[in-house]
Image: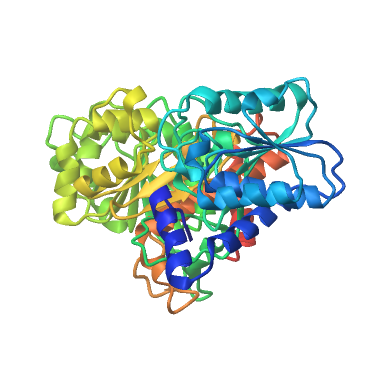
Amino acid sequence: MKPVLTSEEMKKCEQYTIEQVGIPSLVLMEKAALFVCSRIKDEAAGKILIICGYGNNGADGLAAARILAGRGHQVQIVMVGREEKATKENQLQQHILEQLCISVKRGIDTVRETDCYEFVIDALFGIGLHRDLEGEVLKAVRLINTIRQKQGAKVIAVDLPSGLHADSGSIMKDAVMADETVTFQWKKTGMLLGKGPLCCGKTIVGDIGICKVDLAVDHYLVEDGDLLELPYRTPYGNKGTYGKILSVTGSETMAGAMVLSTQAAFRSGAGMVRVLSHRNNRQVLFSAVPEALFVDYDQIMNLDQTPIMAVEKMKEYFEWSTSLLIGCGLSKDKAAELLTEYVMCHYEKTAIVDGDALNIISKHLDWLIARKDKGYPTVLTPHPLEFSRLCGLPVEDAKHQDMDYCMHWAAEYGCILVLKDAVTLITDGKTVYISDSGTDALATAGSGDVLAGMIVMFAVMDNGSEGVQRQRADSSLAADMAVKTAVAVFVHGKAGCYAAEQYHRASVKAGDLPEMIPKVLKEGGI
C-alpha cells in the first residue's frame, strides 16, 4: 500500500528534503517540470497555453514552459494572480524566461477564447489553496474549462487541479476539470475524495526525489501488489480449513441478495457456506448455488421469546461457523430484528453487517458498544444513506468521506467501517485504507451483496486454521482484518472493471461479478 498524503504532510516532506537532505528546491522544480513535459509528445504541433500563478506551482509551470519552448513547441505563457506574492523560485523562473527572450503575458484577459490550443497546462495553485476562488483566478479556471469544452483541448493539471481542495476533495467555488493530473511523489487525499476523481481525470504520479519524512501517516491507497499480502491456500487443506461461513440473509420475498452473497463467498475461497434464511428460499438457493447448505429459520424461531431464546435451536449453527454475514435482503421484520440482536449481542466471532441489519442496528447503537466492550470483531458495510442513518444525520450531511469523522466513529463503536462509494474508505479507527479500483459499472442492484459475501471470506483468512499459511514470514499486514477487508473491496472493484470490459459499463449486473473474482485473484498472484 502506498501512503496518501494531506497537503500539510506533503509540505513537511518537501521541507525535509530541501532543508535536511539538502536537495535544492530548484532541482525538485526542474524534475517536476520535466515530468509535466513528458505528458506532451514531441510531435504535438498545436499551441500550448500555460497558465501560471505566482507560487511554486506556477514556478513549475514556468519551468515546463521553458523546456517545451526549447523543444520547439508553440507556448503561450500567462501569469495570473497577485504579482507581489511571487515566491523567490517563481521570480527566478520568470527571470530565466526573460533572459531567453520567451514572452510572458500578465492577466487572464490576454487570452482569447477564439485562440486555438491543443493543450492547456494549469499551474495556478497546486496543493496550496485553502480558500474559495475569486476574481481573476476564478475567471482563469472557468476559461480553462471553457477552452477544454469548446475546443477539445487537453488539460493537464500540475500537482492538483486549481480550485480542488487538496485534503477533502471539495471544490472551492469552481475547479479545473483536468484530463490528466501530474502529481509528485504521492497522491493527495483530495484527489481520491469528494469531487477529486472527477476533477483530476487520469492521475500520473511522478518520482521527483522528494523524501518521505517520518510522519504518522494514516491514509493508504490499496494497490494490486497488496493481494500478495493475503494468506494463501495450502494444498493440504480441506473444506473446513478455508472457512465455515454462516450467512443470515434473504427474507420471505427477497432471495436475490442471499444468492449473490453466497456465490461471492464461494468464489472468494470459502470452504463451506451455510445459509440461514426463510423456507421460501431453499429451492432458490439450491438452484443457483447447489454447493451451499441451508437452514430455514422461520419454522424453528419463536418470535414471542427473547432473542437468545428465539434462536436457541439454531445455536449450533452459530457455533459451527468461523465467521458470519448478516443483513443482505434480510428485511426489517420481527425475525430479522431478533436475529440481528442475537448476532450483535451474543455472536463472539467475526460478524459482517450489511443491508437491512445496518438499518436495524442504527436504532440500537448500544449493541455495537456491547460488541466493542466484549472484543467481538465487527465489520459494517454502509452505503451513504445507511451511514447517514447510523450517524443520525441527513444524507446530504452524511460524512461518509470525511476521513477524520469516519475514523472517530469507527473508534467510538469499535468496528471496521466500509464506506461504500465511487471511492471506498475502509477504517478501523486508526488507519484509513482507500480503494479507487471501482467503476460506475458497479452502480447496480446487488453489487453490495456481492461485496459483503467477499468480505466475510477475506476478513477471516488465516483465522487460526493450521492449513492456511502466509506467503512471507514478515507479512504482518495479512494479520490485519482491516487490511484484508480493504483488499476485498479492491478485488470487488477490479471484478467490476473486468465485467465492464467483457460486457459494457452500462450492462453489468451484480450476477456477473462473482465470476470475475477468480480472474482478479489469479492475476494478483493468489
Quick check: 139 above or below 231?
Answer: above
**Residue at 66% from the left image edge and 30% from the top image edge:** 507
Q: Residue at x 48, y 40 (%)?
A: 85
Q: Is residue 437 visible?
A: no
* Quadrant position of the C terminus in the picture: bottom right
Q: Give 356 or 69, whichever is nearer the viewer.
A: 69
Asked whether, in this view, residue 398 is left or right of residue 340, the answer is right
Colour scheme of this structure image?
A: rainbow
Residue 428 image position (x, y, % from top left): 31, 52
Residue 122 location, quadrant: top right
- Viewer-side residue, 104 vs 61: 104
Q: Is residue 322 left or right of residue 362?
A: right
Asked if residue 461 is positioned above or below residue 313 in the image, the reply reads below
Say whether residue 64 is visible.
Answer: yes
Q: Nearer the viewer, residue 11 or 465?
A: 11
Q: Position of residue 189 (x, y in %)?
A: 45, 46
Q: Residue furthest bottom?
A: 473
Residue depicted at x 79% and y 47%: 69
- Name, please, the residue furthest toward the front: 99
- Residue displayed at 27% across by 26% down: 393
x, y percentage for residue 151? 77, 25
Task: Give left or right: position of 75 versus 19.
Answer: right
Count of numbered tags = 0
Vertical relation: 339 (above or below) 507:
below
Residue 103 point in image, percent of width and height: 74, 40
Near-viewer residue (364 or 90): 90
